[in-house]
Image (cartoon, helix red, strand yellow):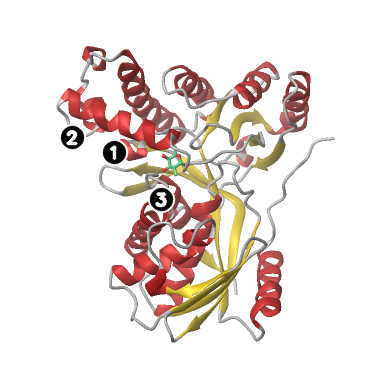
């Protein structure tokens, strides 16, 4: 049987978060806000190289029911370990675990002078974004709370305001949760346009919506959560980032984005591993440009081969795939997907397959049976036919 992960409705999410808030804290929250997880269509492991990515927001979101406090304290609750503390206690590695993503956001907003020193919050979290699936559950958590706090504090929430919030979320992730990630996930979660992919340019922090009306074209994106655990704080992600920075400095450019734009030949690098890492980044940026042009002219099916080429590059040059992701991609392509690739940081997590809407169930079945026949854990699936919207207030 195929295991489908449903997105919750606005009312379902808001009711669940409010119920948890009442049970944990008593009384009523000031409101409920939500932010989406994401899948990246293409442009992987390029955001920290100043590159281009093309993510979409998932309809699956994380909701926070929040009440403002006036004593600079934080209390956070979900199904996971609770945490209580003061904003002044928040520091690298403290709190540990999931609470870092929430406490770190309020800490960063304080540090950036966006909040008065007495600003604190009680927060109850409910999420439809699977955790550890490479679908940006941590960014959804950060962005839902950042948006809630901005709303409660009367901060601007136009695109410029959202970009500022996104940078606080990245600071929380890098400096408190100690995950050295780039900014793509926070950009899409806070700055998405519903029904569109978002071209995220990490060189200047600009974003531009790109048409991605799958349902209107009889297509869908099948998201395959391989259930192979994915972690960005175990050192592998950081090593890739360091390689990319080393390659840029050895080539005498400020970033591999500059190398891509200037057509620098990365094969001149001495170390063959660095050549492969750098080749992935510069070729991936080129694939994003091609995908953007195809989508802008409505040629959606034609991005399929670019998705598959991205997977091959991530697998062979960047070494961030794993048997579960490779099995999902191979099986989806064998079942007739236009293209398929791992999505997100890799080392486990999720893959995507671009398919005809009428093929969704069949492709999912074939991906599941391929996993079974290789002795791998059975995947779960999400089906996306309309890209979701950005962080918003639900109630
Ligand atoms: C993770 C990171 F959080 C992103 O910043 C990005 O680097 C991605 O991996 C790979 O493209 O999601």
Q: Are marks 2 and 1 in contact (CB under 8 Å)?
A: yes
Q: Which residue is mark 2?
A: 254
Picture coordinates of residue 345 (x, y %)?
Answer: 48, 36
The answer to whether residue 380 of the structure is visible from this angle is yes
Q: Which residue is mark 1?
A: 50
Q: CA distance from mark 2 to mark 1?
A: 9 Å
Residue at 48%, 84% (x, y): give it.
69
Residue at 48%, 62% (x, y): give it.
95
Question: Is the residue 138 above or below the residue 257 in the image?
Answer: below
Q: Earlier in the sequence, mark 2 or mark 1?
A: 1
Tell me: is circle 2 under 8 Å from ligand 1: no
Q: Residues within 10 Å of mark 2 (few under 14, many from 20)?
A: some
Q: Please tell me the numbered disc located at residue 178.
A: 3
Q: Please tell me the numbered disc located at residue 6.
A: none
Picture coordinates of residue 231 (x, y %)?
Answer: 53, 41
Nearer to us in this view, 273 or 340: 273
Q: CA distance from mark 3 to mark 1?
A: 20 Å
Q: Earlier in the sequence, mark 3 or mark 1?
A: 1
Relative to residue 316, is residue 278 drawn left or right?
left
């Amino acid at each position: 049987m195929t295991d489908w992960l449903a997105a919750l409705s606005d009312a379902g999410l808001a009711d669940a978060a409010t119920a948890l808030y009442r049970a944990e804290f008593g009384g009523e929250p000031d409101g409920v806000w939500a932010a989406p997880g994401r899948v990246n269509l293409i442009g992987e492991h390029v955001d920290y190289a100043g590159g281009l990515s093309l993510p979409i927001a998932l309809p699956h979101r994380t909701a926070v029911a929040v009440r403002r406090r006036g004593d600079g304290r934080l209390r956070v609750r979900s199904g996971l370990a609770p945490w209580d503390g003061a904003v002044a206690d928040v520091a690298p590695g403290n709190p540990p675990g999931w609470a870092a993503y929430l406490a770190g956001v309020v800490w960063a907003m304080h540090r950036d002078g966006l909040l008065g020193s007495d600003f604190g919050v009680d927060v109850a979290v409910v999420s439809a974004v699977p955790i550890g699936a490479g679908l940006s559950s941590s960014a959804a958590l950060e962005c839902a709370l950042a948006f809630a706090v901005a709303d409660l504090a009367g901060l601007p929430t136009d695109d410029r305001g959202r970009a500022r919030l996104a940078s606080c979320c990245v600071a929380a992730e890098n400096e408190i949760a100690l995950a050295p990630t780039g900014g793509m996930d926070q950009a899409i979660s806070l700055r998405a346009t519903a029904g569109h992919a978002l071209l995220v340019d990490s060189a200047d922090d600009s974003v531009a919506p790109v048409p991605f009306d799958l349902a209107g074209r009889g297509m869908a994106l099948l998201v395959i959560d391989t259930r192979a655990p994915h972690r960005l704080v175990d050192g592998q992600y950081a090593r890739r980032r360091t390689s990319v920075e080393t390659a840029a400095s050895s080539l005498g450019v400020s970033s591999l984005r500059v190398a891509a734009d200037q057509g620098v030949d990365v094969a001149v690098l001495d170390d063959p591993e660095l050549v492969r890492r750098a080749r992935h980044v510069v070729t991936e940026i080129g694939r994003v440009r091609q995908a953007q042009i195809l989508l802008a002219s409505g040629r959606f099916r034609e991005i399929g081969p670019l998705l598959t080429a991205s997977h091959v590059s991530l697998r062979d040059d960047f070494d961030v795939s794993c048997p579960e992701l490779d099995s999902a991609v191979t099986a989806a392509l064998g079942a007739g997907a236009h293209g398929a690739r791992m999505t997100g940081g890799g080392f486990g997590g999720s893959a995507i397959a671009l398919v005809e809407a009428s093929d969704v169930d069949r492709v999912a079945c074939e991906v599941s049976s391929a996993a079974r026949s290789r002795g791998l854990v059975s995947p779960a699936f999400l089906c996306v036919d309309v890209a979701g919207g950005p962080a918003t207030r639900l109630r």
